[in-house]
Amino acid sequence: MKLCDIAHARTGDKGNISNISVIAYDPADFDYLARELDEQRVATVFSSIVQGTVKRYDLPQLGAFNFVLSQALGGGVTRSVALDAHGKSRSAYLLDLDLAER
Amino acid sequence: MLETGARSSTLNAHLVSANAYLGAAPIVEALAGGADVVLTERVADPALFAAPLIHELGWSMTDWHKMGQATLVGHLLECAGQITGGYFADPGFKDVPDLGRLGFPLAEVDEQGTVVITKVPGSGGHVTLATCKEQLLYEIHDPACYLTPDVKADFSQVEMTALGSDRVQVRGGSGRSRPETLKVSMGYLEGYIGEGQISYGGPGAVARGRLALDIIRQRLALLGVIADDVSYDLIGHDALLNTACKAQPNEVRMRVALRTEDPDVAELVGREVEALYTNGPAGGGGASRSVRQVLAVASVLLPRGQVNPAVHYLSV
């Protein structure tokens, strides 16, 4: 099973910080996703582009997580030489994660 | 500066602009003064929506719970179509009807701060729990402490209930006292970004794209080009995540972009890529090039007492 089968996601940007929300379609999947999606796992997905840390914030009542990636946008949206300077395409790559059997 | 820790005076020679993010107060003042239309300088996005709520519902701007609720409404509405199905559709997973006629959102807010997000009947898109949750967390860092000029908003306890077609109730926004500082965005000139692109297709497209990138690397080294930052990409293969895709695409677009203080160097990149037509791998097509000046942004915090907004009224 892929993350995209049970959750959706959206990326946002501020300066050199990228944030990616991951939201379970069914909030009952929150605990399972909390075990699967630790900060280290998300950091590994984006290791080629994120120089800073990954911090996870939990919103269990919404079945949601917010991952905040620091030093993650090539020095900042306005000065980055990246094709996707805002990093907005990242949420889709995160949804490609394989999830373990429950 | 928040980004680097360096002093803002180091940018003085290149500084173009500096704008403090103001809150709702000057807009509320203008509305109280009878303004029909309010033009602002840079204000925090939620303030555009918080101000009319404060004005109409008579909320105190030091009632931090109410300011948190007003900011929650503003945050949900500030990206317009992003809560009604824009920036959301993912065919087969998240289908959205009639995006070509995307309706913009409305919020119904009562005196207690209960909010219903909806949109104009008959317009495209939709308002669902999923669209509202995505927008709630959009460009938020710590949900318990979203810093704005008006309040440290707390969205961490927000709950949502679907009330029916295109109606979602949102409760639980709160907040704590506003920050003592205002964020100031400083625009400064930081050289130029020069870019060149060219496409390769068919069998071996990735290998020819890679060869093209290698040729440009070699050319820039031979020419003694020094860049502040440079990106070598194969669009369609590794340009977004910087790790190669598993499948061999039927076409790729090679892209080289570099940032430099020297406009001639920025110009050179695109010319070198264009020269790949005749001097590069087989079958290169559709070359393009561009140079743009970089207006970079850095942020500092300013004690709010040093910023004195003024409201001027015009009759036309």
Image (spheres, rainbow, N blue to C red):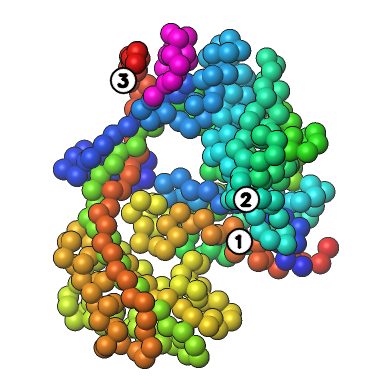
What subunit carries mark 3?
Answer: B
Mark 2 is surrounded, within 10 Å at the Cα level, by few (under 14), some (14 to 19) or many (20 or more) other residues, namely: some
Instruction: Report the residue marked by disc 1.
Output: A92
Q: Position of residue B1 (x, y in %)?
A: 32, 40
Q: In what element is the residue under mark 1?
A: helix
Residue span colored magenta: B26-39
Can residue B257 be seen at all in this image of the molecule? Answer: yes
Q: Is residue B153 left or right of residue B116?
A: left
- Image position of B64 with respect to B43: above or below: above
| Front residue (pair B156, B269) | B269
Residue type of the residue flagged with mark 3: Gln
Residue at 46% across, 84% down:
B201
- Image position of B43 with respect to B246: above or below: above
Residue B27: give its label: none
Q: Is residue B110 left or right of residue B86?
A: right
Q: Is residue B260 left or right of residue B181?
A: left
Instruction: Report the residue marked by disc 3.
Output: B306
What subunit carries mark 1?
Answer: A
Residue at 46% across, 45% down:
A14
